Amino acid sequence: MNNEVRSVQFGEIEGGVTPSGPPSSIGILNDVALVVKAELGRTSMQVKEILKLGVNSVISLDKESGEPVDVLVNNKMIAKGEVVEIDGNFGVRITEIINR
């Protein structure tokens, strides 16, 4: 049995990442899946209140109408925005990026 230890030099990995340095391109992250949420507001309700909900029920949230919505990525707030409607589809227009 050979117990000799030798150094190994690795070449560049496809995508521009080298073992000794940071990625040379953020493109290697393009296929990483993230959970993105737009949160209008929150509330707390008891089960009996939820069971009473029906069509046209209104739920009070902790934000006022017209306030910015929070944009979360993997449950971390990254931006604020406003709800928009285009051709019957809803979306969020980013109005502020949160610096952390």
Image (tube, helix red, strand yellow):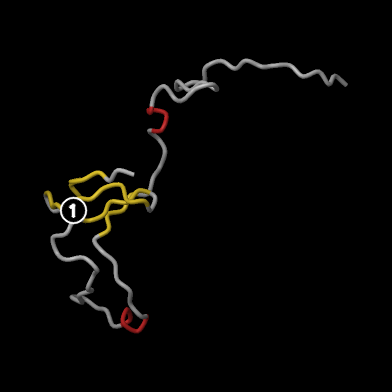
Residue density around tag 1, few if under 14, some if 14–19, many if 20 or more, within 10 Å? few
In the image, taking residue 65 as reference, residue 70 lies left or right, namely right
Residue at 59% across, 17% down? 10
Answer above or below: position of 47 versus 65. Answer: below
Q: Quadrant of the N terminus?
A: top right
Residue at 33% across, 74% down? 44
Tell me the quarter of the picture where residue 83 sits: bottom left
Give the labeled residue for mark 1: 90
Query: Where does the image place residue 82, in percent across and percent down from the top left?
Result: 16, 52
Q: Quadrant of the C terminus?
A: top left
Residue at 41% across, 33% down? 29
Which structural element holds mark 1?
strand
Residue at 30% across, 47% down? 78
Query: Where does the image place residue 11, in percent across and percent down from the top left?
Result: 56, 15
Give the residue furthest to the left: 87
Tell me the quarter of the picture where residue 27 sits: top left
In the image, taking residue 57 as reference, residue 52 lies left or right, namely right
- Count of numbered labels shown in the rendering: 1
Query: Where does the image place residue 89, in percent across and percent down from the top left?
Result: 17, 52
Query: Where does the image place residue 90, in percent across and percent down from the top left?
Result: 18, 53
Give the residue furthest to the front: 100
Task: Identify residue type, mark 1.
Answer: Phe
